[in-house]
Each structure stands twice: as structure tokens, then as C-alpha cells.
Image (cartoon, helix red, strand yellow):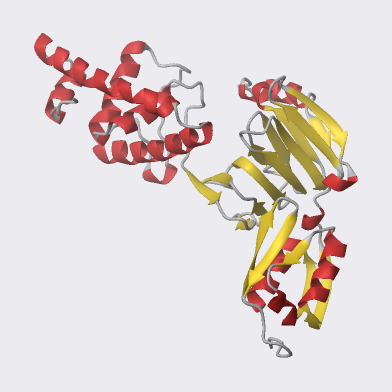
Amino acid sequence: MRKDISSELIKKYLAGNCSETEKRTVDEWFASFEQAEDFISDLPDNEQERLKSNLLSQIKRNIQEAGFNQVATPEAKVLKLPSTNKLNKAAFYAYKIAAVLVLTCGLAFIGYKYWAEQKFSSTVTAATVFNNNQKQIKKIMLPDGSKIWLQENSSLAVADNFGQISRAVTLTGEAFFEVAKDTNRPFEIKTNGVITRVLGTSFNIKAYEKDPNVEVQVVTGKVSVFKTESLDAKSNAAENAEDATKAVVLVPNQKATFVKSTHNLVKNKVAAHELKTVFSKASLSFENTAIGQAIQMLNARFNANIKLSNEDLNNCSIYGDFTDQNLPEILEVICSSIEAEYSLYKDEIIITGAGCPLNKPLP
């Protein structure tokens, strides 16, 4: 069982003023935290990343409050490390103790240790994570005007300083991106094995952890796709520029497939049945239109398979003008107007609701 230890004793340890007995006490106490690593390593990769991000944010706040001089200003929200890529053993040990001192939490130390051992850059930025555990597509608006439609069982991590220096997000699962154009700040999406880089365009990324492949499909504009391993190892602009020639460049109706088992990245034409037509833009007008007729129009326009779960929904009529809207946007408005909701089931979209009284359409 882990023993409590005073912060005064740890401070003496850091200052090098401990007796041999006191030093042994701190060493034994500190070693007890190592046992928690088994818990961390058993978590799925996305849960480890999410835990790491949350723990790092807490560590930075608490170390800052404790007054350690390794912390930048509050506005920066970063924790600066020594300029070398790896800490020497003594310095690394002191950093770990410092993290435990200000947090008094074993898991927080594990998060700090995990982060400090990585060959990352010298700063770490906090992020906000969006999760979608529903059967509806979740729309996310980013500060730069970009729109993201997050699919079921997917998550998106957006840095708190997004847009200030760069525009980078991390995706687990599947999402459709409609990126606002900014020639000075490319938009990057990091997934399992690949990085997708654009200036302003629309495309779909499918990157579920259990899938054997990562797929990027372009609807409009031009997209560059890199293997993560080729960029993560680069530390200067010249090397990155040289590596950019190895990117797979995609135009509309093309896709890149990254095979996780072989690390191969290949480009192909998108088959007709694979096209993400639900995210194409359409302009439609409904005026006292029966919901059944409206669904027929939507199915034809977006090559969709929308169905009603309740016959009473056929009694509803809708009004509305839609200009340059995709299917999820249109469905959101229609379902709201008839007090219904839609859900995704593989290749089907099911609208559920109580419906409307016969011959009494909603106003």
C-alpha cells in the first residue's frame, strides 16, 4: 500500500539535503507510482492519448501555480522543457518528482513521464476534444470558419490555440471536412498513420482504430496526404520540403488509402458507389410538401436511402428553402420542424418521431 509523504521531504530531496534514510524513503515512495503504468498501457490508444492530454493540462496548471520556473506565462498554456531532445537521467528524475510534488497524484505523474520521454517538440499545447457517441452526424464549427461533420463513434481534438500559428486537429474515426481557405496557414488533420494537409477544400477521412486502412476521399479542391512516419522524424524546413515531394496529391473523386499493416500509401479513383454524395451541396425548395415526397427528392439528389420509422410521419408536410446545403444540414432542419430526429444505420438513414395528425400538416 502506498504511504503518504510530506512535500517538505520531497523539497529536501530535490535540493539534495536528504539523509540516506530519507532518500531511501523517497525512492521507495516514488517507485510505487511505476505500478500504475500497467493500467495506462492496457487502455486503447485513443484513450491513452485523451488521458495524456488531460493529465498534461492539469500538470501545467498545477506546476505553474507552484511557481516552478520551467513554466511559461499563463497566456501561453505551454510547459517548456530543456532544449535537448531527451533529458539526462538526473534531470528527468527531478522533473518527475516535481510533477508528483505539485499534483500529489500517481496517474498525473504517469502522464507527465509518458510525455517527457517522447521525442516531441519543446512545447505542448492543451486541446479540446469533441466526441460523437450518437447515431447522428455532429457538426463542429471551428474559429477559422471551417466546418466538420463528425460521424458516430468518432472524436476530434482541436488545440486551444488553433488558428493562432497553425491549424491542426487530430481525428479518430470518420469525419467530413469543409475547410476555410487560408493560404498562410495550411489545415492539417493527424490520423493513425497519415497526415492530411490542405489550404481550403472539402474531403472525407475515415480512420477508425480497428479498421485495417485509413482512407482520405476528396470532394472539392486539392489535398496532400503524407505518411506520419515521414514527417514526424523531420526537424527542419529543408527536410520537410524534400519530403513533401513524396506526398500523395488528390483531386476530386480521388482517394488515398494507407494500409496500416504494410505502411503503403496508394492513390485510386473513387468508385461511383463510394462517393460521399450526402455532403455535396444542393438547393431545394419545399412548400407544403408531403414528407414522403420530400424524402424521395432527397434520396434522388443525394443518392441516399432515407426511410420513415412511423407511418404517421407521412401525414406531415414541410416548408423550406435550402441553398447550397448538404444532406445532414437539410435533415436537421426538416426533423426539427416535424419534431423528429434522424439516425444512421450503415447505409440507411431512419427518421423517427410521433408524426402528424391526418390532414393536419404542421405550419
Q: Picture coordinates of residue 3 (x, y %)? A: 15, 26
- Residue at image coords 77%, 76%: 291
Q: Picture coordinates of residue 174 (x, y %)? A: 66, 44
Image quadrant of residue 207?
A: top right
- Residue at image coords 72%, 19%: 262
**Above/below status of 189 relative to 333:** above
**Above/below status of 22 relative to 66:** above
Please indicate whether residue 14 sits to the left or right of residue 302 in the image: left
**Which quadrant does the C terminus fall into?**
bottom right
Q: Picture coordinates of residue 64 (x, y %)? A: 31, 38
**Which quadrant does the N terminus fall into?**
top left
Q: Nearer the viewer, residue 2 or 14?
A: 2
- Residue at image coords 14%, 17%: 25
- Residue at image coords 63%, 31%: 192
Q: Picture coordinates of residue 122 (x, y %)? A: 47, 27
Please indicate whether residue 345 sits to the left or right of residue 154 in the image: right
Image quadrant of residue 30?
A: top left
Please indicate whether residue 54 sits to the left or right of residue 156 in the image: left
In the displayed orientation, state which residue is furthest to the bottom.
360
**Above/below status of 264 relative to 66:** above
Q: Nearer the viewer, residue 55 or 99?
A: 55
Please indicate whether residue 170 sits to the left or right of residue 262 in the image: left
Res. 166 visible in picture: no
Image quadrant of residue 289?
A: bottom right
Image label count: 0
In the displayed orientation, state which residue is furthest to the top.
20
